[in-house]
Image: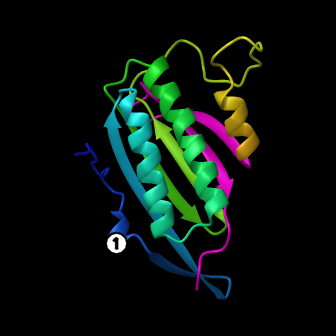
Amino acid sequence: MSHIAHSCGVVPSQDAPSLGHRGGFLAVRLQDAFHFPALNTSVAEARRRVLARLREWGIDEVACDDAQLVVSELFTNAVRHTDSDKVSCQLRINGARLRIEVADQGHTPTEPRARCSGADEESGRGLLLVGALSQAWGVRPDDSGRGRVVWADLPHGPLPH
């Protein structure tokens, strides 16, 4: 049994299609949000949730694979490097862009940044991977001002008509 809860103000996925008319074409915006306890086991749960949701939305397999890797890295960082009780994730499709946001509740004195790791180090390459897979990524304070949101924008193939 998972510990999924939708965030306030975010439409559950079954109600997510939002149709807007922009520039003479119909734009579909899809979004979903969930959170899990800040535990190592939650990383795999988040990856599975993201894959299921993106497949439900008809997102291409390459983007699904990339999104799973990005969520895995960002969730792992939030679990290992913060004092959070829970880690939240938000997915949004806007046109040809998938925005992934992973939020923690507490932060360390340093901001997440990509770094080069030695060949014998077991960790430290996650944000380099996020940067390689995404069109852009960054960090901002969360709404409470205590935690952080790490976001990444990934391209995806067109949604089916």
Which residue: 67% across, 38% down? Answer: 130
Which residue: 67% across, 88% down? Answer: 24
**In the image, what residue type sits under mark 1?**
Asp
Local secondary structure at mark 1: helix
Q: Is residue 1 visible?
A: yes
Q: Which residues are magenta?
A: 134-161
- The answer to whether residue 44 is left or right of residue 85 is right
Q: Is residue 7 above or below residue 94?
A: above
Residue 61 horizontal/vertical position (percent): 62, 62
How many C-alpha atoms fall within 10 Å of the one at disc 1: few (<14), some, or many (≥20)?
few
Which residue is at the front of the view, 89 or 157? 157
- The answer to whether residue 118 is left or right of residue 87 is right
Quadrant containing the C terminus is bottom right
What residue is pinned by disc 1? Answer: 15
Quarter of image, res 26: bottom right
Residue 71 horizontal/vertical position (percent): 53, 42
- The answer to whether residue 35 is left or right of residue 64 is left
